[in-house]
Amino acid sequence: MASSWNEGERVESASTQPKHSGSFKSREEFLSNIVPLAKQVGSEIGLDWRLIVAQSALETGWGSKVKGNSFFGIKGHGSDKTTTFTTQEVIDGKRVTIQDKFRAYDSLEDSVRGYGKFLLDNPRYSKYLSSGNIQDAARELQKSGYATDPNYGKKVLQIAQGKILTDFVDKQQPTPQNQNDQLFNSSISVVQQSKTLEEAKENLKNSWEGFKLLDEPELENLVTQLYSSKTK
C-alpha cells in the first residue's frame, strides 16, 4: 500500500555523498547512486525498488543520457521547472520523434523523490502502487498510460528482473569474510564497553555478536585479548 507523503517533508538522505547531478559515465556508477534512493522511496510509496531503477534505466539508457536531471521522463505539464529534449512516442501505432517538455530537477535524488510524489499525486497510478507483486505492477504501469510504447511495462520488467541489476545486487551482498570482519569489529565494541573481564565475557555471550563465537575454542583467549587491549 502506498503511504502518505507530505510535500516538503524529507527523510534523511539515503547517502552521505553530495547530491549527484547529470549523466553517469557507467552503469555501475548509475546503479551505485540510484539503488539506495530507489530503495528508500520505494519503501515510502509501496513500490518495488527494482521497478524504480528499471524505469529510470529505460528512460535514460542506464543514466547515460540525462538532461535537466529528468531521470524518469515525466512530462512537464503543470511544472514550473522544465527541460526540452527530443524523445520518441508511439502515435497511431507509429513511432515518431518529437520535441517535448519534461520536468527538471536539481539532482538525481530530487528526481527520484519527485517521481515518487508524482505517482502518489496521480490517482491513475494507484493500482500500480498497490500491486501485490512485481509482475502485476509492470502490467498496471502499462495500463496507466505512463508511456505510449505498447511494450513499456514489459521492458521495465525485463530490466528489473534482468542480469545487469541482479548481478549488481549480488555484488553488494557481504562475503563470508566481510561478515566475519563485521562480527569481529562488533565483538571488540562489546568487550571494550565492559567494565571488567567477567562482564566482558558475559556481555559477549549475551550479545548477538557473541552467539557465532560461542563455538570457537578461542573464545576465552579472544575475550581476554580484546579486554587487555582496552586496559593498556
Image: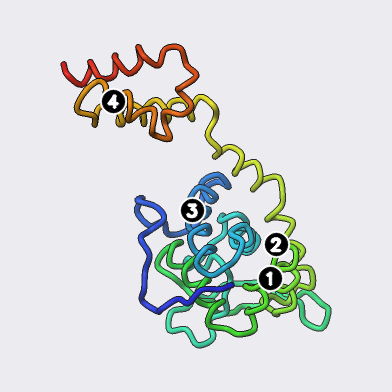
State which mark lies toward you, 3 or 2.
Answer: 2
State which mark lies toward you, 3 or 1.
Answer: 1
Report the Cα–Cα distance between label 4 and label 3. 36 Å
Kindly identify the amino acid type of the residue bearing the numbered disc 1.
Ser
The foreground one among 192 and 13 is 192
Is the residue under label 4 in contact with that under label 1 (CB below 8 Å)? no
Report the Cα–Cα distance between label 1 and label 4. 49 Å
State which mark lies toward you, 1 or 4.
Answer: 4
In the rendered image, the residue lying farthest to the left is: 232
Q: What secondary structure is marked by label 2? A: helix
Report the Cα–Cα distance between label 1 and label 2. 7 Å
Numbered mark located on residue 131 in the image: 1
At x 46%, y 29%, the residue is 211
The spot of residue 202 in percent (x, y) is: 33, 27
Residue where numbered disc 3 is placed: 36
Sequence-wise first label, 3 or 2: 3
Q: What secondary structure is marked by label 1? A: loop
Residue where numbered disc 4 is placed: 200
The spot of residue 209 in percent (x, y) is: 42, 31
The foreground one among 31 and 100 is 31
Kindly identify the amino acid type of the residue bearing the numbered disc 4.
Ala
The spot of residue 65 in percent (x, y) is: 57, 59
The spot of residue 23 in percent (x, y) is: 50, 56
Residue where numbered disc 2 is placed: 134
Is 53 positioned to the left or the right of 92 in the image?
left
The quarter of the picture where residue 107 lies is bottom left
Q: What secondary structure is marked by label 3? A: helix
Kindly identify the amino acid type of the residue bearing the numbered disc 3.
Pro
